[in-house]
Image (cartoon, rainbow, N blue to C red):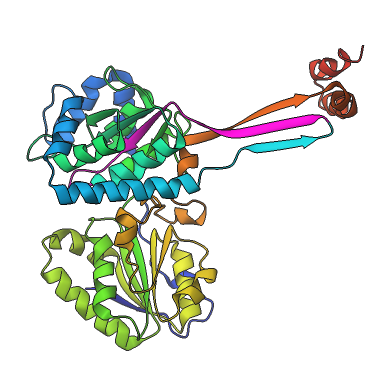
Amino acid sequence: MLKRLDLRGTGDDLASRLPRPAPPGDGHLDAVRQILREVRERGDAAVLEYTAELDGVELASTLVPAARLREALDGIDAELREAMEVARDSIADFHRTELPAPVDYARDGLHVTGRRQPVDRAGLYVPGGRAAYPSTVLMTAVPARVAGVDELVLCVPPSRDTGEVADVTLAAAALAGVDEVHSVGGAQAIAALAYGTETIRMVDVVVGPGNVYVALAKREVAGVVGVPAAFAGPSEVVVVADETTPPEFAAVDVVVQAEHGPDGFAWLISWSESTVDAVSAAVDLIVAGSPRREHIESTLVSNGYAVLVDGPQEAIAVANSIAPEHLELMNADPDGLVPEVRHAGAVFCGPWSPASIGDYLAGPSHVLPTAGTARFSGALNVEDFTKPLHVISLDREAFERVGPYVERFAEAEGLDAHAQSIRARWS
Protein backbone atom coordinates (compact mmCIF):
# COMPACT_ATOMS: atom_id res chain seq x y z
CA MET A 1 0.00 0.00 0.00
CA LEU A 2 2.93 2.35 0.62
CA LYS A 3 4.32 3.50 -2.73
CA ARG A 4 8.06 2.82 -3.00
CA LEU A 5 10.36 5.76 -3.75
CA ASP A 6 14.06 4.97 -4.19
CA LEU A 7 16.24 8.05 -3.73
CA ARG A 8 19.54 6.23 -3.23
CA GLY A 9 22.41 7.66 -5.24
CA THR A 10 20.68 10.98 -5.97
CA GLY A 11 23.21 13.06 -4.01
CA ASP A 12 22.03 16.53 -3.03
CA ASP A 13 19.12 16.51 -5.47
CA LEU A 14 16.65 14.98 -3.02
CA ALA A 15 14.10 17.76 -2.65
CA SER A 16 13.32 18.02 -6.37
CA ARG A 17 12.49 14.31 -6.51
CA LEU A 18 9.93 14.33 -3.72
CA PRO A 19 6.24 14.13 -4.58
CA ARG A 20 4.28 17.07 -3.28
CA PRO A 21 0.62 16.92 -2.28
CA ALA A 22 -1.43 19.16 -4.54
CA PRO A 23 -2.31 22.46 -2.86
CA PRO A 24 -5.99 23.24 -2.31
CA GLY A 25 -7.60 24.20 -5.60
CA ASP A 26 -9.52 27.32 -6.51
CA GLY A 27 -12.74 25.40 -5.94
CA HIS A 28 -11.93 24.94 -2.26
CA LEU A 29 -11.11 28.61 -1.82
CA ASP A 30 -14.15 29.82 -3.77
CA ALA A 31 -16.42 27.70 -1.59
CA VAL A 32 -14.78 28.98 1.59
CA ARG A 33 -15.07 32.61 0.53
CA GLN A 34 -18.74 32.14 -0.33
CA ILE A 35 -19.43 30.71 3.11
CA LEU A 36 -17.49 33.49 4.85
CA ARG A 37 -19.38 36.12 2.89
CA GLU A 38 -22.79 34.58 3.62
CA VAL A 39 -22.16 34.27 7.36
CA ARG A 40 -20.74 37.79 7.57
CA GLU A 41 -23.86 39.18 5.86
CA ARG A 42 -26.61 36.93 7.22
CA GLY A 43 -25.30 35.68 10.55
CA ASP A 44 -27.12 32.81 12.27
CA ALA A 45 -29.41 32.15 9.32
CA ALA A 46 -26.45 31.31 7.09
CA VAL A 47 -24.75 29.25 9.82
CA LEU A 48 -27.86 27.11 10.31
CA GLU A 49 -28.42 26.71 6.57
CA TYR A 50 -24.85 25.51 5.98
CA THR A 51 -25.08 23.17 8.97
CA ALA A 52 -28.17 21.60 7.43
CA GLU A 53 -26.62 21.45 3.95
CA LEU A 54 -23.10 20.28 4.79
CA ASP A 55 -23.57 18.34 8.03
CA GLY A 56 -27.09 17.07 7.42
CA VAL A 57 -28.32 18.40 10.77
CA GLU A 58 -31.25 20.77 11.29
CA LEU A 59 -30.75 22.98 14.36
CA ALA A 60 -32.87 25.68 15.94
CA SER A 61 -29.78 27.12 17.65
CA THR A 62 -26.08 26.29 17.70
CA LEU A 63 -25.68 26.94 21.43
CA VAL A 64 -25.27 23.84 23.57
CA PRO A 65 -26.89 24.40 27.00
CA ALA A 66 -24.30 24.72 29.75
CA ALA A 67 -26.04 22.00 31.76
CA ARG A 68 -25.23 19.50 29.01
CA LEU A 69 -21.50 19.92 29.67
CA ARG A 70 -21.86 18.96 33.33
CA GLU A 71 -24.19 16.08 32.48
CA ALA A 72 -21.67 14.77 29.96
CA LEU A 73 -18.81 14.99 32.45
CA ASP A 74 -20.83 13.19 35.12
CA GLY A 75 -21.81 10.53 32.62
CA ILE A 76 -18.41 9.38 31.32
CA ASP A 77 -16.73 6.37 32.88
CA ALA A 78 -14.25 6.88 35.69
CA GLU A 79 -11.19 5.64 33.78
CA LEU A 80 -11.80 8.01 30.86
CA ARG A 81 -12.35 10.92 33.24
CA GLU A 82 -9.08 10.11 34.99
CA ALA A 83 -7.25 9.99 31.64
CA MET A 84 -8.70 13.39 30.71
CA GLU A 85 -7.70 14.87 34.06
CA VAL A 86 -4.15 13.54 33.76
CA ALA A 87 -3.91 14.98 30.23
CA ARG A 88 -5.35 18.33 31.30
CA ASP A 89 -2.89 18.66 34.17
CA SER A 90 0.08 17.60 32.03
CA ILE A 91 -0.83 20.11 29.33
CA ALA A 92 -1.28 22.88 31.90
CA ASP A 93 1.99 22.09 33.69
CA PHE A 94 3.93 22.17 30.43
CA HIS A 95 2.42 25.41 29.17
CA ARG A 96 3.12 27.15 32.46
CA THR A 97 6.80 26.56 31.74
CA GLU A 98 6.35 28.44 28.44
CA LEU A 99 4.86 31.57 29.99
CA PRO A 100 7.25 34.35 28.97
CA ALA A 101 9.03 36.33 31.65
CA PRO A 102 8.19 40.04 31.91
CA VAL A 103 10.59 42.48 30.23
CA ASP A 104 12.29 45.09 32.37
CA TYR A 105 14.78 47.29 30.51
CA ALA A 106 16.36 50.43 31.90
CA ARG A 107 19.13 52.63 30.55
CA ASP A 108 20.09 56.08 31.77
CA GLY A 109 16.58 57.12 32.79
CA LEU A 110 14.74 55.42 29.91
CA HIS A 111 12.63 52.60 31.30
CA VAL A 112 10.66 49.98 29.32
CA THR A 113 8.58 47.24 30.90
CA GLY A 114 6.79 44.60 28.87
CA ARG A 115 4.46 41.70 29.34
CA ARG A 116 2.28 39.39 27.28
CA GLN A 117 -1.32 40.53 27.61
CA PRO A 118 -3.94 37.80 27.04
CA VAL A 119 -6.78 38.38 24.61
CA ASP A 120 -10.27 38.65 26.09
CA ARG A 121 -12.02 35.95 24.08
CA ALA A 122 -10.63 32.96 22.19
CA GLY A 123 -12.40 30.79 19.62
CA LEU A 124 -11.48 27.10 19.66
CA TYR A 125 -12.23 24.86 16.71
CA VAL A 126 -12.38 21.09 17.24
CA PRO A 127 -13.18 18.61 14.45
CA GLY A 128 -16.10 16.28 14.95
CA GLY A 129 -17.41 15.01 11.65
CA ARG A 130 -15.69 11.60 11.50
CA ALA A 131 -14.81 11.11 15.17
CA ALA A 132 -14.91 12.82 18.54
CA TYR A 133 -11.75 14.61 19.68
CA PRO A 134 -11.89 15.46 23.39
CA SER A 135 -8.08 15.61 23.29
CA THR A 136 -8.22 18.59 20.94
CA VAL A 137 -10.54 20.39 23.34
CA LEU A 138 -7.88 20.08 26.02
CA MET A 139 -5.02 20.90 23.64
CA THR A 140 -6.64 24.22 22.68
CA ALA A 141 -8.53 25.26 25.81
CA VAL A 142 -5.89 24.52 28.44
CA PRO A 143 -3.09 26.64 26.88
CA ALA A 144 -5.61 29.47 26.51
CA ARG A 145 -6.53 29.25 30.18
CA VAL A 146 -2.86 29.16 31.20
CA ALA A 147 -2.30 32.26 29.05
CA GLY A 148 -5.02 34.06 31.03
CA VAL A 149 -7.84 34.27 28.47
CA ASP A 150 -11.14 35.17 30.15
CA GLU A 151 -13.65 33.60 27.73
CA LEU A 152 -13.33 30.40 25.73
CA VAL A 153 -15.78 29.60 22.93
CA LEU A 154 -15.74 26.14 21.36
CA CYS A 155 -17.17 25.25 17.95
CA VAL A 156 -17.49 21.58 16.99
CA PRO A 157 -19.54 19.96 14.21
CA PRO A 158 -22.64 18.00 15.29
CA SER A 159 -22.82 14.28 14.64
CA ARG A 160 -24.72 13.36 11.50
CA ASP A 161 -26.22 10.41 13.39
CA THR A 162 -27.42 12.16 16.54
CA GLY A 163 -27.43 15.82 15.55
CA GLU A 164 -25.54 16.60 18.76
CA VAL A 165 -22.00 17.12 19.99
CA ALA A 166 -20.46 13.92 21.39
CA ASP A 167 -20.61 13.55 25.17
CA VAL A 168 -16.85 12.95 25.43
CA THR A 169 -16.22 16.29 23.71
CA LEU A 170 -18.61 18.09 26.04
CA ALA A 171 -17.03 16.39 29.04
CA ALA A 172 -13.59 17.62 28.00
CA ALA A 173 -15.02 21.12 27.56
CA ALA A 174 -16.36 21.00 31.11
CA LEU A 175 -13.01 19.81 32.48
CA ALA A 176 -11.13 22.55 30.61
CA GLY A 177 -13.46 25.33 31.73
CA VAL A 178 -14.89 26.22 28.31
CA ASP A 179 -17.53 28.95 28.63
CA GLU A 180 -19.63 28.30 25.51
CA VAL A 181 -20.01 25.36 23.15
CA HIS A 182 -21.63 25.76 19.75
CA SER A 183 -22.72 22.86 17.57
CA VAL A 184 -21.31 24.11 14.29
CA GLY A 185 -18.34 23.14 12.17
CA GLY A 186 -16.58 23.86 8.90
CA ALA A 187 -15.85 27.24 7.39
CA GLN A 188 -19.17 28.52 8.74
CA ALA A 189 -17.88 28.05 12.29
CA ILE A 190 -14.70 29.99 11.54
CA ALA A 191 -16.79 32.76 9.96
CA ALA A 192 -19.08 32.97 12.99
CA LEU A 193 -16.14 33.19 15.39
CA ALA A 194 -14.36 35.82 13.29
CA TYR A 195 -17.28 38.07 12.33
CA GLY A 196 -19.82 37.29 15.03
CA THR A 197 -23.49 36.41 14.64
CA GLU A 198 -26.61 36.96 16.72
CA THR A 199 -25.70 33.91 18.82
CA ILE A 200 -21.91 33.71 18.60
CA ARG A 201 -20.07 36.87 19.62
CA MET A 202 -16.87 37.52 17.70
CA VAL A 203 -13.61 36.44 19.28
CA ASP A 204 -10.09 37.85 19.28
CA VAL A 205 -8.20 34.75 18.12
CA VAL A 206 -9.24 31.53 16.38
CA VAL A 207 -7.22 28.34 16.89
CA GLY A 208 -7.55 24.62 16.26
CA PRO A 209 -7.08 22.02 13.52
CA GLY A 210 -9.54 21.05 10.82
CA ASN A 211 -9.97 19.89 7.25
CA VAL A 212 -8.81 21.89 4.26
CA TYR A 213 -11.92 24.09 4.32
CA VAL A 214 -11.41 25.01 7.97
CA ALA A 215 -7.71 25.70 7.47
CA LEU A 216 -8.39 27.89 4.43
CA ALA A 217 -11.14 29.76 6.28
CA LYS A 218 -8.76 30.54 9.13
CA ARG A 219 -6.21 31.84 6.63
CA GLU A 220 -8.88 34.05 5.04
CA VAL A 221 -9.99 35.68 8.32
CA ALA A 222 -6.45 36.29 9.59
CA GLY A 223 -6.23 40.00 10.23
CA VAL A 224 -9.88 40.24 11.23
CA VAL A 225 -8.93 38.04 14.18
CA GLY A 226 -5.64 36.62 15.29
CA VAL A 227 -4.77 33.28 13.69
CA PRO A 228 -1.53 31.38 14.40
CA ALA A 229 0.75 31.25 11.37
CA ALA A 230 0.65 27.46 11.14
CA PHE A 231 -1.71 25.85 8.64
CA ALA A 232 -3.31 23.30 11.02
CA GLY A 233 -4.83 21.01 8.42
CA PRO A 234 -4.96 17.26 7.70
CA SER A 235 -2.58 15.12 9.73
CA GLU A 236 0.95 14.17 8.66
CA VAL A 237 3.70 11.83 9.87
CA VAL A 238 7.21 10.87 8.80
CA VAL A 239 8.79 7.81 10.46
CA VAL A 240 12.55 7.33 10.16
CA ALA A 241 13.50 3.69 10.72
CA ASP A 242 16.47 1.30 10.40
CA GLU A 243 17.34 -2.33 11.06
CA THR A 244 16.88 -1.86 14.82
CA THR A 245 13.31 -0.62 14.48
CA PRO A 246 10.56 -3.10 15.38
CA PRO A 247 8.59 -3.20 12.09
CA GLU A 248 5.24 -3.39 13.84
CA PHE A 249 6.05 -0.22 15.82
CA ALA A 250 6.93 1.76 12.72
CA ALA A 251 3.96 0.37 10.80
CA VAL A 252 1.34 1.25 13.37
CA ASP A 253 2.78 4.75 13.77
CA VAL A 254 2.49 5.29 10.02
CA VAL A 255 -1.13 4.18 10.24
CA VAL A 256 -1.94 6.24 13.35
CA GLN A 257 -1.91 9.59 11.59
CA ALA A 258 -3.37 8.18 8.36
CA GLU A 259 -6.53 7.10 10.18
CA HIS A 260 -7.54 10.75 10.58
CA GLY A 261 -8.64 10.60 6.95
CA PRO A 262 -7.93 12.16 3.55
CA ASP A 263 -5.57 14.93 2.41
CA GLY A 264 -2.78 14.26 4.92
CA PHE A 265 0.24 12.04 4.37
CA ALA A 266 2.16 9.19 5.99
CA TRP A 267 5.78 8.48 5.05
CA LEU A 268 8.36 5.90 6.05
CA ILE A 269 12.03 6.78 5.41
CA SER A 270 14.88 4.29 5.77
CA TRP A 271 18.33 3.41 4.45
CA SER A 272 17.57 -0.29 4.96
CA GLU A 273 15.66 -2.04 2.18
CA SER A 274 14.79 -4.97 4.45
CA THR A 275 13.27 -2.52 6.94
CA VAL A 276 11.15 -0.91 4.23
CA ASP A 277 9.95 -4.35 3.13
CA ALA A 278 9.08 -5.44 6.66
CA VAL A 279 7.33 -2.22 7.66
CA SER A 280 5.38 -2.04 4.40
CA ALA A 281 4.12 -5.59 4.90
CA ALA A 282 3.13 -4.78 8.48
CA VAL A 283 1.23 -1.68 7.31
CA ASP A 284 -0.81 -3.82 4.90
CA LEU A 285 -1.77 -6.20 7.69
CA ILE A 286 -2.79 -3.40 10.07
CA VAL A 287 -4.87 -1.63 7.45
CA ALA A 288 -6.66 -4.82 6.44
CA GLY A 289 -7.90 -5.32 10.01
CA SER A 290 -8.60 -1.71 10.95
CA PRO A 291 -12.15 -0.52 11.72
CA ARG A 292 -11.13 2.77 10.04
CA ARG A 293 -9.76 1.07 6.96
CA GLU A 294 -11.54 3.41 4.55
CA HIS A 295 -10.00 6.53 6.13
CA ILE A 296 -6.52 5.01 6.27
CA GLU A 297 -6.60 3.82 2.68
CA SER A 298 -7.78 7.22 1.45
CA THR A 299 -4.60 8.74 2.89
CA LEU A 300 -2.12 6.01 2.00
CA VAL A 301 -3.33 5.52 -1.56
CA SER A 302 -2.79 9.19 -2.36
CA ASN A 303 0.03 10.18 -0.01
CA GLY A 304 1.58 7.09 1.55
CA TYR A 305 5.26 6.53 0.69
CA ALA A 306 8.11 4.25 1.69
CA VAL A 307 11.33 6.12 0.84
CA LEU A 308 14.76 4.54 0.49
CA VAL A 309 17.77 6.82 1.03
CA ASP A 310 21.54 6.36 1.35
CA GLY A 311 21.82 7.01 5.08
CA PRO A 312 20.70 8.91 8.18
CA GLN A 313 21.77 12.33 6.90
CA GLU A 314 19.80 11.88 3.69
CA ALA A 315 16.78 10.74 5.71
CA ILE A 316 16.82 13.97 7.71
CA ALA A 317 17.36 15.99 4.53
CA VAL A 318 14.15 14.47 3.14
CA ALA A 319 12.31 15.11 6.41
CA ASN A 320 13.46 18.74 6.52
CA SER A 321 12.31 19.24 2.96
CA ILE A 322 8.86 17.90 3.82
CA ALA A 323 8.60 19.79 7.16
CA PRO A 324 6.10 17.29 8.58
CA GLU A 325 3.65 17.79 11.38
CA HIS A 326 5.00 14.73 13.25
CA LEU A 327 8.53 13.38 12.85
CA GLU A 328 9.37 10.06 14.54
CA LEU A 329 13.05 9.15 14.80
CA MET A 330 12.80 5.43 15.48
CA ASN A 331 16.34 4.56 14.44
CA ALA A 332 19.24 3.31 16.59
CA ASP A 333 20.53 6.81 17.46
CA PRO A 334 17.63 9.26 17.40
CA ASP A 335 19.34 11.76 19.70
CA GLY A 336 22.21 11.97 17.23
CA LEU A 337 19.82 13.09 14.50
CA VAL A 338 17.84 15.65 16.51
CA PRO A 339 20.42 18.46 15.98
CA GLU A 340 19.97 18.00 12.23
CA VAL A 341 16.20 18.51 12.36
CA ARG A 342 15.27 21.99 11.19
CA HIS A 343 11.62 21.74 10.19
CA ALA A 344 9.01 19.67 12.03
CA GLY A 345 5.99 20.35 14.18
CA ALA A 346 7.09 17.90 16.88
CA VAL A 347 9.84 15.28 17.07
CA PHE A 348 9.49 11.92 18.84
CA CYS A 349 12.63 9.95 19.68
CA GLY A 350 12.99 6.21 20.01
CA PRO A 351 10.65 3.21 19.87
CA TRP A 352 8.88 4.13 23.12
CA SER A 353 7.89 7.65 22.05
CA PRO A 354 5.05 7.29 19.55
CA ALA A 355 3.36 10.43 18.28
CA SER A 356 0.17 9.27 19.96
CA ILE A 357 1.75 10.19 23.32
CA GLY A 358 2.02 13.75 22.01
CA ASP A 359 -1.53 13.55 20.70
CA TYR A 360 -2.90 13.10 24.21
CA LEU A 361 -0.75 14.00 27.19
CA ALA A 362 2.96 14.70 26.69
CA GLY A 363 2.25 18.37 27.39
CA PRO A 364 2.86 20.44 24.23
CA SER A 365 -0.27 21.07 22.20
CA HIS A 366 -1.01 18.58 19.44
CA VAL A 367 -2.23 21.46 17.27
CA LEU A 368 0.79 21.47 14.96
CA PRO A 369 1.82 22.99 11.63
CA THR A 370 0.95 21.06 8.47
CA ALA A 371 1.31 21.62 4.72
CA GLY A 372 4.95 22.64 5.10
CA THR A 373 4.27 25.50 7.51
CA ALA A 374 6.64 23.94 10.05
CA ARG A 375 9.26 25.84 8.03
CA PHE A 376 8.22 29.00 9.88
CA SER A 377 5.84 28.03 12.69
CA GLY A 378 5.41 25.55 15.51
CA ALA A 379 2.93 24.09 17.97
CA LEU A 380 0.09 26.12 19.39
CA ASN A 381 1.31 27.74 22.62
CA VAL A 382 0.43 30.36 25.20
CA GLU A 383 1.84 33.20 23.09
CA ASP A 384 -0.80 32.51 20.44
CA PHE A 385 -3.39 33.73 22.98
CA THR A 386 -1.47 36.86 23.96
CA LYS A 387 0.11 39.95 22.50
CA PRO A 388 3.02 42.06 23.73
CA LEU A 389 2.33 45.23 25.70
CA HIS A 390 5.18 47.67 26.39
CA VAL A 391 5.15 50.56 28.86
CA ILE A 392 7.74 53.30 28.24
CA SER A 393 8.77 56.08 30.61
CA LEU A 394 11.62 58.63 30.69
CA ASP A 395 12.82 61.05 33.30
CA ARG A 396 13.81 64.59 32.26
CA GLU A 397 17.48 63.80 31.99
CA ALA A 398 16.82 60.86 29.67
CA PHE A 399 14.46 62.98 27.55
CA GLU A 400 17.06 65.70 27.14
CA ARG A 401 19.64 63.10 26.13
CA VAL A 402 17.60 61.33 23.42
CA GLY A 403 15.28 64.16 22.37
CA PRO A 404 17.68 65.71 19.83
CA TYR A 405 17.99 62.38 18.02
CA VAL A 406 14.21 62.07 17.79
CA GLU A 407 13.97 65.63 16.52
CA ARG A 408 16.48 64.91 13.74
CA PHE A 409 14.60 61.78 12.68
CA ALA A 410 11.32 63.68 12.55
CA GLU A 411 12.82 66.49 10.47
CA ALA A 412 14.32 63.98 8.03
CA GLU A 413 10.91 62.37 7.58
CA GLY A 414 9.12 65.71 7.17
CA LEU A 415 6.98 65.18 10.27
CA ASP A 416 7.00 68.62 11.83
CA ALA A 417 4.55 67.83 14.65
CA HIS A 418 6.75 64.97 15.76
CA ALA A 419 9.72 67.33 15.92
CA GLN A 420 7.60 69.96 17.68
CA SER A 421 6.62 67.42 20.37
CA ILE A 422 10.31 67.44 21.31
CA ARG A 423 10.95 71.19 20.91
CA ALA A 424 7.91 72.07 23.05
CA ARG A 425 9.54 70.38 26.01
CA TRP A 426 12.87 72.23 25.83
CA SER A 427 11.52 75.32 27.60
The spot of residue 107 in percent (x, y) is 81, 36
Of 305 and 160, nearer the camera is 160
Q: Tell me: residue 314, above or below residue 18.
A: below
Q: Is residue 10 magenta?
A: no
Left/right placement of residue 103 relative to residue 45 reads right
Residue drawn at x 20%, y 43% is: 128
In this picture, is 138 found above or below 150? below
Q: Is 170 on the left or on the right of 187, as rendered?
A: left
x%, y% of residue 350? Answer: 38, 73
Specify the quadrant that holds the N terminus: bottom left
Q: Which residues are magenta?
A: 109-133
**Against 336, is 408 above or below?**
above
Q: Percent x, y for residue 427?
A: 92, 11
Question: Residue 263 sits in which quadrant?
Answer: bottom left
Q: In this rendering, would 3 be left or right of 19?
A: left
Q: Residue furthest right?
A: 427
Residue in the picture at 29% in, 23% down: 200
The answer, for residue 27, to whether it is visible in the render is no
Q: Can you see residue 54? A: yes
At 69% from the left edge and 36% from the top edge, which residue is drawn? 104
Number of numbered tags placed on the structure image? 0
State the image coordinates of residue 255 (x, y, percent, origin top left): 24, 66
Considering depth in this image, is 415 or 81 the residue closer to the camera?
A: 81
Dividing the picture into quadrants, the one containing residue 397 is: top right
Farthest-out residue, bottom: 274
| The magenta stretch spans residue 114 | yes
